[in-house]
Image (tube, grey):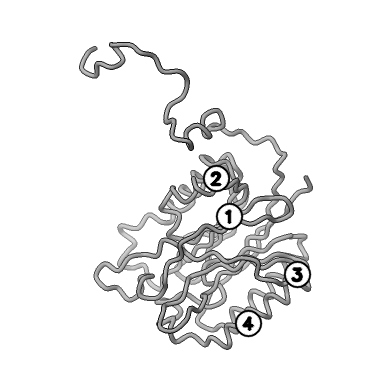
């Protein structure tokens, strides 16, 4: 198959929807000029993150957000690129919105949406935690892009490997994971926080154990801990953007490339519940756990 060019785009997400929109539109143009087929943005890239840039998601300017989203859809159509857009999706009545990634095709149409399933908890009543701002989603998002089966994840989802095994069962070959590891102030977290090391390591592991490509995109806001990166199916990071710098990382994917898959001999049987390799034997010395 032809090479699929993916743009992982990062910038500093702010409270100003119009400013975020303009950054996104420019990065779409930059990615298209670089030959990208799809442009991937971070969590809540357009709306800002509830509890951080946005003090309360219920106070968002929904009309402005709607018009900004429409402008991005138009840009996708004009540049003939797909866009994975992090934003906030309004629900009805008093229900809190979803933390979402819109899947926008190259005709400028929203063809699917992923809603973050694992929102962070409410321990201690911290108003910056997700459940004070968002309603969790309840389904996977899998779609086809030029013959490549794609899936979507958002930030804290990465802590739950069950989601990625499910995506593998659904045939996902390319994962778009949108993060917002950019709290306003990490001063009280820095001594115990290992996200700078943990996030890349976990995403590399998800890529290698499930043998799919991963685009992992973060905000570049002041307290960002790591830059956006791309991982191939053996877990190797093929490119990374610097922290705190706006930019686009162009990566290439070819499903026919020969990339070592260490789990291949037994993954399918493991997914079906056979959690061992080879042939078992009926042997009393195998069954006796107290002998040597």
Mark 1 vs mark 4, foreground winner is 1
Q: Secondary structure at mark 4?
A: helix
Q: Element type at marker 3?
A: loop
Residue assigned mark 4: 68
- Which of pointers 4 and 2 indicates the residue nearer the eye? 2
Can you say which quadrant of the picture contains the C terminus? top left
Mark 4–mark 2 distance (CA, rounded to whole Å): 33 Å
| N-terminal-most mark, 1 or 4 | 4
Quick one: label 1, few (<14), some, or many (20+) residues within 10 Å? many
The numbered dot on residue 151 is 1
Viewer-proximal residue, 139 or 176? 139
Residue at horizontal 72%, vertical 45%?
A: 254
User: Which residue shows up at 78% across the image and 67% down it?
Assistant: 80
Q: Quadrant of the N terminus?
A: top right
Q: Are marks 2 and 1 in contact (CB under 8 Å)?
A: no
Distance CA(mark 4)–CA(mark 3): 17 Å
Q: Which residue is mark 3?
A: 107
Q: Position of residue 240 (x, y in %)?
A: 59, 54
Q: Which mark is residue 168?
A: 2
């Amino acid at each position: 198959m032809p090479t699929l060019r993916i743009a992982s785009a990062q910038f500093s997400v702010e409270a100003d929807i119009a400013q975020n929109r303009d950054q996104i539109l420019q990065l779409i143009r930059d990615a298209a000029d670089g030959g990208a087929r799809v442009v991937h943005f971070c969590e809540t890239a357009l709306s800002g993150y509830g509890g951080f840039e946005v003090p309360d998601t219920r106070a968002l300017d929904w009309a402005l957000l709607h018009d900004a989203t429409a402008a991005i859809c138009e840009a996708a159509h004009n540049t003939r690129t797909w866009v994975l857009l992090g934003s906030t999706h309004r629900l009805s009545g008093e229900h809190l919105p979803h933390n979402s990634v819109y899947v926008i095709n190259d005709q400028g149409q929203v063809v699917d949406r992923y809603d973050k399933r694992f929102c962070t908890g409410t321990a201690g009543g911290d108003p910056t935690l997700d459940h004070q701002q968002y309603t969790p989603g309840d389904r996977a998002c899998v779609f086809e892009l030029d013959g490549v089966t794609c899936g979507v994840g958002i930030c804290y989802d990465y802590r739950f490997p069950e989601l990625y095994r499910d995506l593998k069962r659904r045939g996902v070959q390319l994962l778009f994971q949108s993060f917002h590891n950019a709290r306003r102030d990490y001063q009280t977290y820095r001594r115990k926080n290992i996200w700078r090391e943990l996030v890349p390591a976990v995403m590399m592991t998800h890529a290698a154990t499930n043998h799919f490509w991963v685009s992992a995109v973060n905000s570049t806001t002041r307290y960002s801990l790591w830059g956006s990166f791309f991982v191939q199916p053996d877990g190797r990071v093929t490119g990374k953007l610097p922290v705190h710098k706006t930019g686009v990382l162009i990566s290439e994917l070819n499903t026919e490339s020969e990339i070592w898959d260490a789990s291949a001999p037994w993954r399918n049987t493991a997914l079906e519940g056979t959690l061992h390799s080879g042939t078992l034997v009926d042997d009393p010395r195998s069954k006796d756990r107290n002998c040597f």
